[in-house]
Image: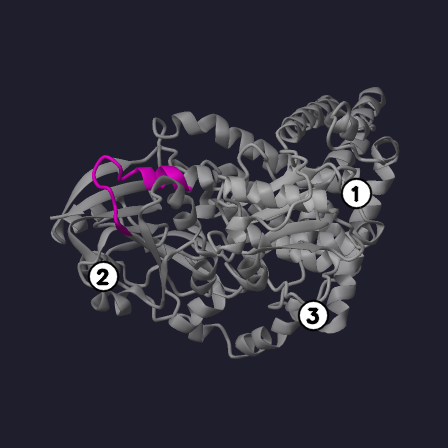
Amino acid sequence: MRSRRWFKAGRLLPLVALLVTVLDALAKRRRLAALPVLPVVPRQRTARSEVDGSVAPMRLVRAEGVEVDQVTESGARALAEREGLSVVNLVPRDLPTAQALDLLHDIDPRTYRQDRQAKGHGGGHAVLAEERLLGAVGLARRGVPSAVELARAEKELKPHAAARTQVVLAPRLWSSPSVLAQDAEVLRVRHGMQLNPDLATALTIPGLIVASGLFSPGLAFAALAAWSAHPVMVFAGNKNLKPADLWAYSLQRLVREPRRLVAALRADAAHKANGVDPVEQRRAQYRADLEGGLERFFERERTDCPWCGGGELKVRLRSGDLNQGKPGEFRVDECLACGHVFTNPQPTAEGLGFYYRDAYDGLNEDMIQGIFATRRGYFQPQAETVRPYVTPRTWLDVGTGHGHFCNAAKEIWPQTSFHGLDMSEGVPIAERRGWIDRGYRGMFVDLAPSMPDRYDVVSMFHYLEHAKDPHQELEAATKVLRPGGYLLIDVPDPACRWAGLLGKWWSIWLQPQHLHFFPVENLRKRLTELGYTVVLEQHAEAHQPADLLTSAWMAVRAVAPERDVPWRPEPPSTLRRVARGVTFAAGTPLMAAGALVDTALSGVAEKYGLCNSYRLLARKD
């Protein structure tokens, strides 16, 4: 009976793969149809506005081996002046199929300009940009950049000109063989530290199709044919972007796509072998940290509640570091008097430094930035929360990281001055990009006395659970808010039913970084004691529907052999690397199923107690 069920489930795989392939082709085709086409403008001199200084001077940068005619440059300059653009990325009309698919995967031309969080990705051949921005991303006037250097610059130009960047098709620009010859290196630059998992995911669908041939050869063949024809579904009939290798690539996709990805992995390995392996650069420091033992990373165990002082505690759960896989075991206790939940014993300052290192920056920076870059639809409703109560002139975002919230919120409140505060290196980066108007780097409790009664709004989005002393953090917010100002808080909800159903696999526990979990009644009461009036409590609006997806991801990660991380004494063997990639590819359907269920339940999450977060808005009286 069991084998029969497995056989029936196996027959569904090619049908699911076929459906996903067709839907993805249709989505990319819609994006392609929206790709702007550069208008043909007769050759002209530099625009008068650029000469008289009313707009910033711009420079055309082309990769080595690329030719850009004067008509194309004139059209780009005219477009920039007419639409107020600081960056114009030029896409060749014959951009090869693989590179064109990458482009349509990363950007949606329908929203690209206004989406301040969108990924920096262009055609990889030429870009027109303001001189100051080119200097900021390392493209000096001297010399012609390689394709790799231009790709790296394209990645950063969009963040530096978040709402003033556009990607356009240039009908008179042709692909350069010298640029395409560096495709593997360009892929490495664009994917960063996410190269291995991203490439494993890219091969998941063809891998599943091939595997499904054991259950249903006919359906598997049809699904494989559809996957091979996917590029044709995307580009056939388009009059503007016409990949010269479209039919050849489609016929050979099962061979050419894996070969391209393997080339990128080899380029990454060669890059690391030349002494620029960030993992090896960190291994000695982690070895020294661990040789001293883990005991010094933790305070003495508490026998009372840090929130109410109650002395009756119970163990809520025990967990390891399921996020990064660093060594250590952590216990989460619950106070029976007030319901406060906290890590016990708590990490010391040195311990937090150890467990935070490479979590949000360093080795994991590309992944974290990629995640935050997709959350425009979550950040903007957060910014909208205050609209019925205040029109903010000044807004301080505490725990701002790289300033992603502030960047997205500028679309909602363009006249507001957004300031950001954080301990990380993200603060100066956010300032350089213009995502925040002013940055503070340090501890909020230490900095608050220097800026009293300054802000109309202070936001703490998933910050308070990280704080060593939440009481002091709330008092600090009270100091910097002007009378009548608003404190906006999002925190995990320990009453969420997923916390009990998923146990330690509920990703919101995030040990040992999340130190405190607040029942909503406790936080409301404390705010009232500090002189606030809570004007809004939201649960469904603060919910982030990803509980099952992230739990599945952590489970697959726990089963898979370790990736190369510096807190392990030696890098994994080639066999372990392959095994990890295969495990992640095999686990992709589980994660996809989790994402589907999360989405399906999001509309009824509040009704059934499944909201993983809540939001409070309180006015300082």
Residue 603 visible within the image: yes
Instruction: Kindly identify the residue that appears in the image at 83 percent across and 33 percent down.
Output: 246
- Image quadrant in which you'd find residue 497: top left
Q: Is residue 396 above or below residue 409?
A: below
What residue type is disc 1 on? Trp
Comparing labels 3 and 1, the label whose residue is closer to the camera: 1
The span picked out in magenta is: 379-394
Instruction: Locate residue 375, reporting x and y percent.
Output: 47, 42
- Is 392 a magenta residue? yes
**Which amino acid, by three-letter code, is at mark 2?**
Ala
Q: Earlier in the sequence, mark 2 or mark 1?
A: 1
The answer to whether 442 is drawn above or below residue 495 in the figure is below
Report the quarter where the N terminus lies: top right
- Mark 2–mark 1 Cα distance, whole angstroms, equals 57 Å
Q: Position of residue 95 (x, y in %)?
A: 77, 40
| Residue under pointer 1 | 174
Instruction: Answer with mark 3 or mark 1, whichever residue precedes in sequence.
Output: 1
Q: Amino acid at mark 3?
A: Val
* Residue 42 pos. (x, y %): 68, 39
Q: Quadrant of residue 152?
A: bottom right
Q: Is 147 within the magenta?
A: no
Q: Residue at x 84, y 46 (%)?
A: 259
User: Whole-percent x and y of residue 241?
Assistant: 74, 33
Q: Between tags 2 and 1, which lies in front?
A: 1
User: Are there few (<14), some (14-19), or many (20+) residues within 10 Å of tag 3?
Assistant: few
**Residue position for label 2:** 476
3D distance between C-alphas at marks 3 and 1: 33 Å
Q: Which residue is mark 3?
A: 276
Give left or right: position of 263 versus 350.
right
Callout 1 environment at 10 Å: few (<14), some (14 to 19), or many (20+)? some
